[in-house]
Amino acid sequence: MRLSDLQHKDVINISDGKLVGNIIDVIINSLNGNMEKLVIEKNRFFVSLFSNKNEIEIKWEQIEKIGEDVILVRVDL
């Protein structure tokens, strides 16, 4: 699977069923080459008035399933 394939999928939080956002980048471990985190551009509903960060990082371990159209993650936002 390519990064461009992942970028077309919606990221859904299975804790509450809400859209987290879309993948804009990945963080790769420079020592072993493994993908460590997905960088997600937050859905406009998740952008807080108290936070100026428009992106979050999802650890690889937080990914529950990568489906045909969505990526299911478990995060506490």
Image: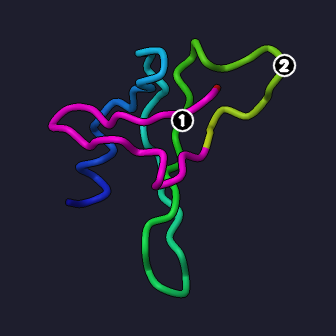
Identify the residue at image location x=84%, y=19%: 50
Quadrant where the C terminus is found in the figure? top right
Vertical placement of 44 versus 40: above or below? above
> Cβ–Cβ below 8 Å for labels 1 and 2?
no
Vertical placement of 6 versus 14: above or below? below
The location of residue 62, given as percent across then percent down, is: 48, 45
Which region shows up in magenta?
Answer: 57-76
- The residue most toward the left is 68
The location of residue 60, given as percent across then percent down, is: 46, 55
Determine whether, in the image, residue 48 is placed left or right of residue 18: right
Vertical placement of 8 versus 46: above or below? below
* The one of 42 and 74 positioned closer to us in this rendering: 74
SS of the residue under disc 1:
strand
The residue singled out by tag 1 in the image is: 41
Kind of residue at disc 2: Phe
Kind of residue at disc 1: Glu
Residue at mark 1 to residue at mark 2: CA–CA distance: 17 Å
Answer whether residue 59 is magenta in the image: yes
* The one of 22 and 63 positioned closer to us in this rendering: 63
Answer whether residue 9 is magenta in the image: no
Identify the residue at image location x=66%, y=32%: 54
Q: Which mark is residue 50?
A: 2
Determine whether, in the image, residue 59 is placed left or right of residue 70: right
**To which quarter of the image does residue 76 belong?**
top right
